[in-house]
Amino acid sequence: MEFEQVKKEFRARKKELDENFRIRLHRAISWMDQAREEGADLRFVTLWIAFNAFYAQRLGNQYGDSGDRATLRDFLDKICRLDKEHLIYDVLWKEYSGNLRALLDCPWIFREYWDYQAGRCTLAAFQEDFDKAKSKTKTDLERGNTNSILATVFDRLYTLRNQIIHGGATCNGKANRKQLRFGADLLACLNLVIIKIMLDSYPQEQWGELYYPYVKDNDF
């Protein structure tokens, strides 16, 4: 699935989409377009912003904290449920299966590893959690459990995202280069698939209130 193909389908259907849904996809596509011009670090960041645009929602009257991890997990579950053509399965098991296990077995993007580094748990406790996670990943891969693998992938990518967004990485540095490049490639492909699934499920499925909606007129 190519970016230009997905963008063309979105543009062809723009007039039939309600404003919130149209803006949600428009924002995501704009960042995906920009990602093609960036180096590895900023490419990953812009692709994550695009992905965030798909699912970020305003919770009540609150801005600034979207309950990101819980909202993310709910979104991934929903996307998997709506994936009638098994597009996510094809991405994970046909296009990127070769590098997937290496990504999931990497301790540097395993959240509990950094708990150990910060002294919040012992080396033995970290190693036990990591071994359990690897065992679960192995079982999920053997059983083709797409939902669980997708959630695990994004849990790892979320840790990688935090390292960059919160200033915990050097731009164009040496650390996590393989994980960063593979993560960006995988995220680019999954973003295309997600747009396809969201468009195909419209208008039956709703995607919640926009996070920071577009304001046409204001007093400032």
Image (cartoon, grey):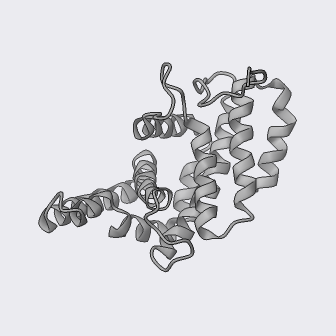
- Tell me: residue 19, above or below residue 158: above
Q: Position of residue 95 (x, y in %)?
A: 59, 64
Q: Write down the quadrant of residue 79 in the picture.
A: top right
Q: Position of residue 173 (x, y in %)?
A: 51, 77
Q: Nearer the viewer, residue 53 or 119?
A: 119
Q: How many marks?
A: 0
Q: Is residue 121 visible?
A: yes
Q: Residue at x 77, y 47 (%)?
A: 6
Q: Nearer the viewer, residue 200 or 58?
A: 58
Q: Residue at x 36, y 69 (%)?
A: 108
Residue at the limit of the structure toward the bottom, as seen here:
174
Q: Position of residue 58 (x, y in %)?
A: 53, 26
Q: Write down the quadrant of residue 91 in the picture.
A: bottom right
Q: Nearer the viewer, residue 127 or 163?
A: 163
- Tell me: residue 46, above or below residue 179: above
Q: Looking at the rendering, in which quadrant would you find the C terminus?
A: top right
Q: Residue at x 51, y 40 (%)?
A: 80
